[in-house]
């Protein structure tokens, strides 16, 4: 095996703070309102995190307690509907004042349409955020900053520790132990892993959790970006073969199961493990408060490029200002607060997500453990971090192809070729 080296090039590296096409709308009103002029102001904040709307409102209530003339109305929408709703909202007069903007390629359409306010020279404290996180809120063409990042997410294997203890099972530390664990769960009549494969966006996540060490994590990222390798390489194909091999450890009808139903399989004890994001933890704890949960990194597979397990991760998104908002000054004051440790700690405590801001701590022991695993050995969630800047995105190609692999309709080689062909329509290595 080749020695693993952490590479910065485009990857989510250890954040210094962790240890601790529409026409442009008309401009803002000529007399933008500030939260400091005594006039009552209502700021509409939009997000795709509908499931945590109540918690996000609690976060913003802390701000309004200190700014009594400001009212914040947080509106959460379904993730799959958000992009279209936001695109429409930013074009009209009834959109948000502040919007949660998806990271990397997800922010580019609004930036290119001149619908967001550039904040790089208006907000203090952005330079304290690690550049690999901050770049998720930058325009790809101009390099300017348009949002304040609010969280980063990590990808790993969750498991039902209560069930494991009852069955005498332990976290695997080698690939053989990992496979033996899946076989033991099958013998117990328990679905080893719950995956909602009907929604193909989860499958590139699954692929990186299982196969990142096999194809090389950040090492592969650097090579594919500079053109010295492609997704058709033997190592990447082999990582997809590992994903295909996991099919026997999923529900027999996995391609028909939605994410919400898979989550219920896991929290009800019908499935023992969940390959997913740190953003899922709060859902599990809310749905099954009496269950103890655990987490581990999938061990290194045979012939892997890396010799240590890794935790893939990515910057989740940022809060940006709608250029058509009539409350520009008040919105800017709110974003300034979002660079404070107070805001970051509220995100950690209420939303249970990792903040990129300095001084934030994690009282939840499992959240702290996940963060320690990530900071020790991070890797990029590759197809999101680097290959969502064009059409088709890497995730849009790979997700449906993993579905077809599960059905036996495509081979890992064909899926890898599809991925390389798809991103090659817009991605040029070395640029």
Image: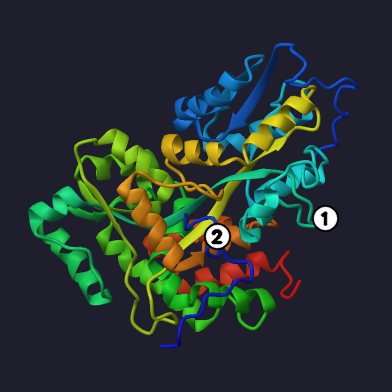
Where residue 166 sits in the image (x, y, percent)?
8, 52
Q: Judging from the image, what secondary structure is the residue with disc 2 in?
A: loop
The residue indicated by pointer 2 is 15
Q: Judging from the image, what secondary structure is the residue with disc 1 in?
A: loop
Q: Of discs 2 and 1, which sits in the foreground?
A: 2
Viewport quadrant of the C terminus: bottom right
Where residue 270 sits in the image (x, y, percent)?
20, 45
Q: Is residue 255 above or below residue 378?
A: above
Q: How far apart are marks 2 and 1 (CA)?
A: 24 Å
Which residue is pictured at 53% across the width and 41% down the height? 344
Answer with left or right where residue 208 lies relative to residue 159: right
Which residue is pictured at 45% across the width and 57% down the height? 205
| Displayed quadrant of residue 265 | top left
Q: In this view, does 6 lie above or below 75?
A: below
Answer with left or right where residue 41 lies relative to residue 170: right
Which residue is pictured at 91% across the width and 22% down the height? 30
Work out which residue is located at the far right of the displayed protein and give it: 30
Where residue 315 sits in the image (x, y, percent)?
57, 53
Pick whichever, 106 or 230, lies toward us. 106
Query: How many residues crowd mark 2 within 10 Å: few (<14), some (14–19), many (20+)?
Result: some
Viewport quadrant of the N terminus: bottom left
Say if residue 403 shows up in the picture: no
Say if residue 148 shows up in the picture: yes
Answer with left or right where residue 378 lies relative to residue 95: left
Which residue is pictured at 50% across the width and 72% down the height? 217
| Displayed quadrant of residue 279 | top left
Q: Which mark is residue 232?
A: none
The residue indicated by pointer 1 is 142
């Amino acid at each position: 095996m080749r020695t693993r080296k952490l590479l910065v090039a485009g990857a989510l590296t250890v954040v210094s703070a962790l240890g601790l096409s529409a026409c442009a709308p008309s401009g803002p009103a000529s007399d933008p309102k500030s939260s400091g002029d005594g006039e009552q102001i209502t700021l509409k904040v939009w997000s795709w995190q509908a499931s945590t709307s109540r918690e996000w409102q609690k976060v913003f209530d802390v701000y309004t307690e200190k700014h009594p003339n400001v009212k914040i109305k947080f509106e959460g929408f379904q993730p799959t509907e958000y992009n279209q709703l936001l695109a429409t909202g930013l074009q009209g007069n009834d959109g948000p004042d502040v919007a949660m903007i998806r990271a990397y390629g997800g922010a580019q359409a609004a930036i290119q349409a001149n619908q967001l306010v550039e904040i790089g020279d208006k907000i203090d404290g952005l330079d304290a955020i690690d550049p690999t996180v901050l770049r998720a809120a930058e325009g790809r063409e101009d390099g300017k900053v348009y949002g304040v990042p609010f969280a980063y997410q990590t990808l790993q294997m969750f498991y039902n520790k209560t069930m494991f203890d009852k069955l005498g099972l332990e976290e695997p530390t080698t690939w053989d132990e990992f496979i033996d664990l899946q076989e033991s769960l099958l013998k117990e009549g328990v679905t080893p892993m719950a995956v909602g494969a009907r929604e193909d966006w989860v499958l590139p996540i699954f692929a990186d959790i299982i196969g990142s060490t096999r194809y090389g994590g950040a090492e592969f990222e650097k090579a594919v970006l500079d053109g010295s390798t492609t997704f058709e390489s033997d190592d990447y194909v082999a990582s997809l073969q590992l994903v295909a091999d996991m099919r026997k450890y999923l529900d027999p009808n996995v391609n028909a199961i939605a994410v919400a139903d898979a989550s219920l399989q896991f929290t009800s004890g019908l499935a023992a493990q969940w390959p997913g994001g740190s953003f899922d933890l709060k859902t599990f704890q809310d749905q099954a408060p009496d269950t103890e949960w655990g987490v581990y990194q999938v061990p290194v597979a045979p012939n892997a490029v890396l010799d240590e397990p890794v935790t893939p991760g990515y910057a989740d998104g940022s809060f940006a200002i709608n250029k058509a908002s009539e409350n520009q000054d008040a919105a800017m004051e709110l974003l300034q607060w979002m660079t404070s440790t107070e805001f970051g700690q509220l995100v950690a405590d209420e939303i249970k997500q990792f903040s990129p801001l300095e001084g934030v701590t994690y009282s939840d022991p499992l959240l702290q453990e996940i963060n320690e695993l990530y900071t020790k050995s991070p890797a990029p969630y590759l197809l999101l971090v680097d290959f969502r800047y064009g059409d088709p995105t890497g995730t849009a190609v790979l997700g449906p192809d993993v579905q077809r692999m599960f059905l036996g309709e495509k081979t890992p080689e064909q899926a890898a070729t599809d991925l390389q062909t798809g991103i090659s329509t817009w991605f040029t290595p070395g640029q």
